[in-house]
Image (spheres, rainbow, N blue to C red):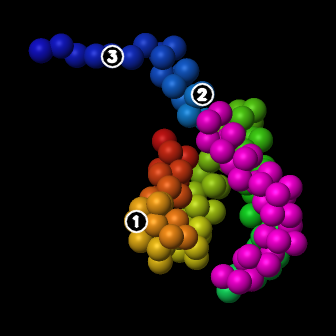
Amino acid sequence: MSTVSASPHTVAYGAALLRVSLGALFLAHGLTKLLVFTPAGTVAYFQSLGLPGPLAYLTIALELGLGLSLVLGVYARWVALLGVPLLLGTIVSVHGGNGFGFSNPGGGWEYPALWAVLLIV
């Protein structure tokens, strides 16, 4: 029986890859809300879900801030933990009622749940 052990360098590279990848995804989602959907469009979408409109601005700011912090590695562990409630809120308020699979109409909750777990790791 063999055992596989990772060198400290491999672990550090893996953590950096995960951190930068998640940061890039948060930046992409925040920039999409800001530049494509526009803040006004994002507010309207949030309101159509029964959420308060100003929550859209907070969400855009959090996604951009989380993304930038994770990509740059600035307070990455603490910032990652701050992202977990954002994703859990997304599951509860947007995707939870659409079932598990993200390919379901409206997107299920598997994708934001995966993000939340990866932020904890």
Residue at 81% across, 63% down: 37
The N terminus is located in which quarter? top left
Residue at 52% across, 65% down: 107
> Can residue 78 be seen from the camera position used here?
no
Q: Main secondary structure of the magenta part?
A: helix
Report if residue 83 lies within the magenta region: no
- Height in image: 1 above or below 23? above
Front label number (1 vs 3): 1
If you read the primary sequence from the N terminus, does the residue marked by circle 1 or circle 3 appear first? Answer: 3
* Extreme residue toward the bottom, this view: 50
Residue, disc 1: 100
Q: Nearer the viewer, residue 34 or 71?
A: 34
Residue, disc 2: 16
Badge 3 amino acid: Ser
- Height in image: 62 above or below 6? below
Give me the C-alpha separation between circle 3 and circle 2. Answer: 18 Å
* Extreme residue toward the left, this view: 1
- Height in image: 35 above or below 76? below
Badge 1 amino acid: Phe
If you read the primary sequence from the N terminus, does the residue marked by circle 1 or circle 2 appear first? Answer: 2
Residue 114 x/y as whole percent: 47, 52
Residue, disc 3: 5
Mark 2 falls on what kind of element? helix
Q: Are marks 1 and 2 in contact (CB under 8 Å)?
A: no
Few, some or many C-alpha atoms within 10 Å of disc 3 (few <14, some 14-19, many ≥20)?
few
> Can residue 3 be seen from the camera position used here?
yes
Give me the C-alpha separation between circle 1 and circle 3. Answer: 34 Å
Region rendered in magenta: 20-49
